[in-house]
Amino acid sequence: MVTGAAGFIGFHIARRLLGEGRDVVGLDNLNAYYDPKLKQARLEILRADPRFTFVQADLADRAGVAELFARHRFAEVVHLAAQAGVRYSIEQPDAYVDANLQGFGNLLEGCRRNQCRHLLYASSSSVYGANAKVPFSVGDMTDHPLSFYAATKKANEMMAYSYSHLYRLPVTGLRFFTIYGSWGRPDMAIFLFTKAIIEGRPIKLFNHGRMRRDFTHIEDASRIVLRLIDHVPPAGPAGAAPARIYNIGNQHPEELLDVVALLEKQLGRSAVKDMLPMQPGDVPQTFADVSDLLRDTGLKPGVSIADGIAEFVAWYRGYYRI
């Protein structure tokens, strides 16, 4: 099962799994956090494969989730459904309690009661919060989240570990670092900037543009997740839980103004820049240490920011017929 299958990362993971000849049950509640038409367009592509089954459901529905697991007894679950967005979590925290906490609890119960072989779940680079040490390593302290979204993702990691310890459920947490690329989310920076530049509207650059992000292309992220599905964590020494966490990042932070310059080049027009102060819940820099990932899988991201932006702009022009 892939949860959030109509979402950005979930769509790409489901499509790769189908390409490998696997049967995939995709779950999504198709909420209106952003344009549902984009979600439906992704689903149309997935539904063209007879191995794909779509279930519209909400993970916060305890009885519905239990029934779904009992019916399918999933061997592997890739959990990517969540209420996303740092700023939205400040405005609508209840949505994060329902989706990211209650929904994840229901998913864990489904996995442990039906002997799931491996649960992979989405965490976020935002768990590093106020951590001043860079690059961010999986062993670093993550006890100072700067947004409620980050707090729910940290809670997910703790919930998953407890289930892994108590019930020997193999779990792998995926700390994603600013994923971007074709079919991306309209609320994320590269999508927002592209749309604004094309329409001649100002782009908002917080902290006066002095931001660095470890932009990670969706092709790299999805390739790594596919490898990790069959990389089931073993129990550690002295009965330690079969649980792992990996950074999914490019290991190369980019200056935000440099990213804007690449977009300007691809779009053939200049951006109107609105320089603003730092906003609540944000951090000035993200930078992934992926040495654990490289050691355990032999994989590391390889799509450059220039190639990734060219790919995204080409998709954007095609999808929106520009």
Image: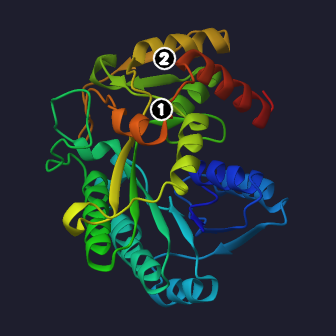
Q: Which residue type carries mark 2?
A: Val
Q: Can I make out residue 273 in this image? A: yes
Circle 1: element type: helix
Q: Is residue 289 left or right of residue 141?
A: right
Mark 1 Cα within 10 Å, few/some/many (few <14, many 20+)? Answer: some
- The reply to whether dot 1 and dot 2 touch (C-beta < 8 Å) is yes
Res. 128 image quadrant: top left
Where's residue 40, x and y in %?
Answer: 72, 58
Q: In terms of depth relative to the viewer, which is nearer, 272 or 285? A: 285
Where's residue 96, x and y in %?
Answer: 35, 64
Where's residue 175, x and y in %?
Answer: 37, 46
Q: In terms of depth relative to the viewer, which is nearer, 230 or 47? A: 230
Marks 1 and 2, Cα distance to the nearest angstrom? 10 Å
Q: Which residue is mark 1?
A: 189
Q: Residue at x 28, y 27 (%)?
A: 285
Q: Which residue is mark 2?
A: 259
